[in-house]
Amino acid sequence: MGRAPGIIVNIIYAIFWVSWELWDYFDVLKLGVVTYFSIFNIVNQRNNIMNTVCEFNLFVRFALQYPIGFVRQAFSGLPIHTINHLETKFIRCYNDRGSYGAMIAFWSELSEQNRNILTDYITKSKL
């Protein structure tokens, strides 16, 4: 019985040492995972910014040279009374803000659903 406490202490020490070594290994592993996801997020943020800049450029280009009758083309899938309403809204924005401010004013008065429709149209038109 005299040796049992020594063996138990050695087993506890071995378990502690193995746990400590594994913890260090997992620290390195966690650091690698965190670094990977940090780089991944930075790349994603850069790509999102680039996409936003491209979308913004498309919008500005469209706002400065939109084709005549684009409201009817962009919203052609909606009921005719909605298209007429949106066209009237755009004409009012044009009369109030002029050719440079019309698209910004029109955009700000659209619902989110109609903004999405117009965004799809602008993206596909690629003026």
Image (cartoon, rainbow, N blue to C red):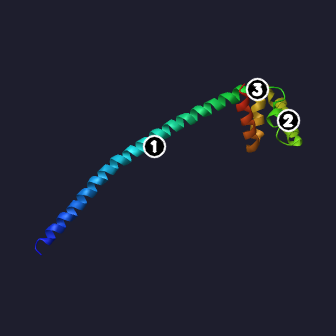
Dot 1 or dot 3, earlier in sequence: 1
Mark 2 or 3, closer to the camera: 2
**Picture residue at 76% right of the left edge, 24% below the top:** 65
Marks 3 and 2: in contact by CB < 8 Å? no
Residue for badge 3: 100
Q: In the rendered image, is residue 11 in sight?
A: yes
Crowding near pointer 1: few (<14 within 10 Å), some, many (20+)?
Answer: few
Q: Is residue 46 left or right of residue 108?
A: left
Which residue is label 1 attached to?
A: 37
Quarter of the view holding residue 23: bottom left
Q: Is residue 68 left or right of residue 8?
A: right
Image coordinates of residue 94 in percent, x first then y, are: 82, 30
The Cα–Cα distance between marks 1 and 2, rounded to whole angstroms, is 47 Å
Q: Position of residue 28 (x, y in %)?
A: 33, 46
Packing grade of label 2 (10 A; few <14, some 14-19, many >=20) is some
Q: Earlier in the sequence, mark 2 or mark 3?
A: 2
Indicate the secondary structure of the residue bearing disc 3: helix
Mark on residue 87?
2
